[in-house]
Amino acid sequence: MKHILALLTALLLAPLAALHAADVKPNVVIVLVDDMGYGDIAAHGNPVIRTPQLDRLHAESVRLTDFHVDPTCSPTRAALMTGKYSHHVKVWHTIAGGNHLRANELTMADAFRANGYRTGMFGKWHLGSNLPYRPIDRGFDEWLGQGDGGVGTTDDYFLNDRVNDHFIHNGERDKPMEGWAEEVFFNSAIDFIRGSKKAEKPFFIHLATYAPHKPVVLPDPSCADDYKKKVDDETAFFFATIEKIDAQIGRLRATLAEVGLERDTILIFMTDNGGTTGVKLFNAGMKGGKGSVYDGGHRVPCFVHWPDGGLRQGQDITSLNANFDVLPTLVDLCGLKLPRNVDFDGRSFRAQLLDAKTETPERTLFVELQRSFTAEKWRGAVGMTSRWRLVNNKELYDIKADPRQTNNVIAEHPDVVATIRQEFESYWTKVTPGDRDRAEFIVGDDRQSETVLSSSDWYLPENPPWNHVHIANGLTASGDWIIRAAGTGTYRFEVRRWPREADAELAGLPEIHKTVDSWSAKGPKPDLLYGSEMTKFKKLPVASVRLTVGEKTQTLAAAAGTKEVSFDIQLATDRSYPVKAELLDPSGKVITGGYYVYCRRENR
């Protein structure tokens, strides 16, 4: 009888605990790790890696074991932030303007801020580098980051290498901070937690690491020595980086416990796409990795931990869930009132968190890898149910019987294929309208006094120059940006080959004076992060610069020794303007595009 009473009490208290926690506004921390796969955790069976903190979190959390994201960075982040398919919110690439989350979309940060939360974003955003796409334009009170797409990308500080770098803080560029970048982000998140505790306000933190995305580097190469005894050097550095992130997660949890907030905080751990370097050693029995529409490309770990929320610790949710389910779930768990109506593509899995055996209605989900300038049906796409995977509209796998996706049974199940295809038509009708509309930067606004346009955002079907090594090599390409003026007036456009902090001439090369403090598996990083050993810098014979803004084109000579050429152009507010900069040789021939344009309003 005592056992029955205890069981009844537990059943009654679990939902009550969740309701009570919602009343007192639980804090929320989402840790999103870049390019770490499902198999890169010891608790998932990896025979080499050491992840004691994640193993502990795994043991103490509800684990979503059939949880899916997009196969690459930006689309996953867009879906997570909005509760909608990435295609639905016009995020279809990681570069070339396809990574900008449109300003009309309500974000997770918007939702929490509207409910009295302090909101902080620490680390990788990858949803837009300028107004109106930056984290502080999208609901975050506090933002510390580096290059939008990653360290070493064209909008990142020139010599950043993940150690003792320059950061962007609340929109202000080039803030130097000492230490390994991931530790800097965790330190900032920890400070934010302490500040929120002192202010007696609930908080929402999005903590997104740039590592272990390639190039994988460490502040101390000896960190990888133990792993080198078991795996190749590249994998050793990759695993050592994950182990260092794992330790930071332990610090984060220790801080929550220290300030008395661990039980009142929803902690979610997940990654942004399938595995990369670690896949060759262990991929948890899956096929494919990052960039693939087989399960190994988009099925990732997801742990949800909330001691006071009545969640079943150490249990698995085996039903099909996805990144765009997270926001509806948090709205449900935290009792958030949205500032406006949102038609989520995702749904709440709160009931499953409280009881992992809860049955949920069957549904069909889709994952795509478009990365094309024209949307194409079934291009890099998979339709998923709890049992089936229809890959590229050509292969059908019974994921329960064949998790490695080796036996294509499309011929044997025409009814299943027909149903998924029909569901895809409905999905396509919903997500494609306006899906390739160009992103527009707002210039001359008080919220961002100077806009830095860089080549990674050029709208080019072929990949634009997106990292600093491409710039150093003088990669030949030329694209444009779209801007809109915040106010009518004269705008100065400063065209450069090199970013301003490189302090180099248009026709010259930068002088590199850098302390080596970062190492990859191939050795020290003496200059650029994406370089191998010493980067090859190429001079360009720049004699003049041509700038086209809207219908106006001007060409100005580049005097010997000049570092930039500036143009003053009148802009109005009633239209948008394409902007294209080109570097010309002495004969007037285009060498390449102007990789950097700094734009600001004069006489404000």
Image (cartoon, helix red, strand yellow):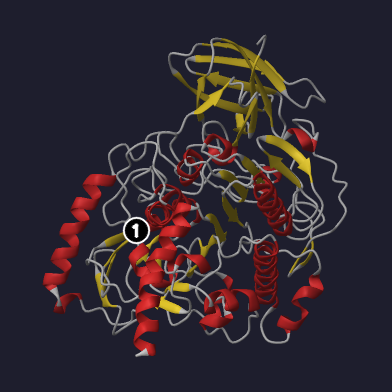
Residue named by callout 1 = 348
Q: Answer with the quarter of the image where residue 580 lies.
A: top right
Q: Is residue 247 above or below residue 490?
A: below
Q: Quadrant of the N terminus?
A: bottom left
Left or right for 374, reference 311: left
Examine the rendering and report whether any part of residue 277 can be seen: yes
Task: Give the residue drawn at x 31%, y 51%.
Answer: 345
Residue type indicated by callout 1 = Ser
Residue 140 placement (x, y as % from top left): 56, 41
Q: Quadrant of the C terminus?
A: top right
Task: Give the residue drawn at x 19%, y 58%.
Answer: 423
Residue 399 placement (x, y as % from top left): 30, 78
User: Camera-side residue: 144 or 408?
Assistant: 144
Q: Residue furthest left?
A: 415
Left or right for 403, reference 393: right
Q: Secondary structure at mark 1?
A: loop
User: Camera-side residue: 113 or 398?
Assistant: 113
Residue 149 placement (x, y as % from top left): 58, 48
Q: Is residue 27 above or below residue 155?
A: below
